[in-house]
Image (spheres, rainbow, N blue to C red):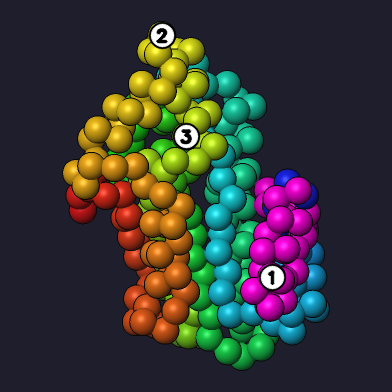
Amino acid sequence: MDLNTDRLAQVRREVQALGRKASVSAADVSQRDAVYAAIDHAEAELGGFDIMINNAGIAQVNPIADVAPEEVERILRINIQGVLWGIQAAAAKFKARGHKGKIINASSIAGHDGFAMLGVYSATKFAVRGLTQAAAKEYASAGITVNAYCPGIVGTDMWVEIDERFSELTGAEKGRTYEKFVEGIALGRAQTPDDVAALVSFLSGDDSDYITGQSILTDGGIVYR
């Protein structure tokens, strides 16, 4: 589920190249009906599913004093409502089929520690942790676990955008903000998407069956809880 149809097509090809089925839907996660429709589509094409990963999200870099109402509304719709609709839709399917399931939400180190210039983003990621805990309590009796993963400084397009925005606001040389964050990582390197995928894979598997309501950090040593 994504708005980027090129990326959807690429993921479909990669999954099918492994000899597996793939169902993709172009959908805006901030729209509840669109999320439910995408889940219905996946169920119809795949015959059901056992894991829901609510991964969509955006970042905004701005001092709190400069945050505009429309910016707040947009990030809340995507980062909070998108997760909420995903939880609702997946849990409804799991319960209707009478089987256990796993719901995994994307939080962040910014959901454990508020970051300057990322105040509203941090607030949304704290909210994801709250939703994760509440949903874990509500759905435990149905055998549904709900957890979150909290990445750190990952070498992705989002961090390129964050770095560029910090440069605009502070006058720092492009790339320097990212470098400074990486320098603060205890394990001495930036995180890769594979590092994040390893935790998500664990939370998706049988070894995590007795874990629920947790927001697990995977950041190489930035935030300690």
Q: Is residue 183 or residue 33 the one in the foreground?
A: 183
Q: What crowding class fits label 3: few (fewer than 14 Cα within 10 Å), some (14-19), or many (20 or more)?
A: some
Going from N to C along the chain, the mark reached first, 3 or 1, is 1
Q: Is residue 13 or residue 102 the one in the foreground?
A: 13
Quadrant location of residue 42?
bottom right
| Residue type, label 1 | Ala
**Residue 109: percent from left, percent from top:** 34, 45
Between label 2 and label 1, give the one nearer the viewer: 1
Q: Going 42% across and 30% down the picture, which residue do you hit?
A: 118
Going from N to C along the chain, the mark reached first, 2 or 1, is 1
Res 159 label: 3
Tag 2, which secondary structure? loop
Note whether 53 is above or below 166 in the view shown: below
* Left or right position of 77 against 125: right
| Residue type, label 3 | Trp
* Left or right position of 107 against 16: left
Q: Which residue is mark 1?
A: 17
Region of the chain picked out in magenta, as a range: 6-35
Mark 2 and mark 1: span between their CA atoms? 45 Å
The N terminus: image quadrant: bottom right
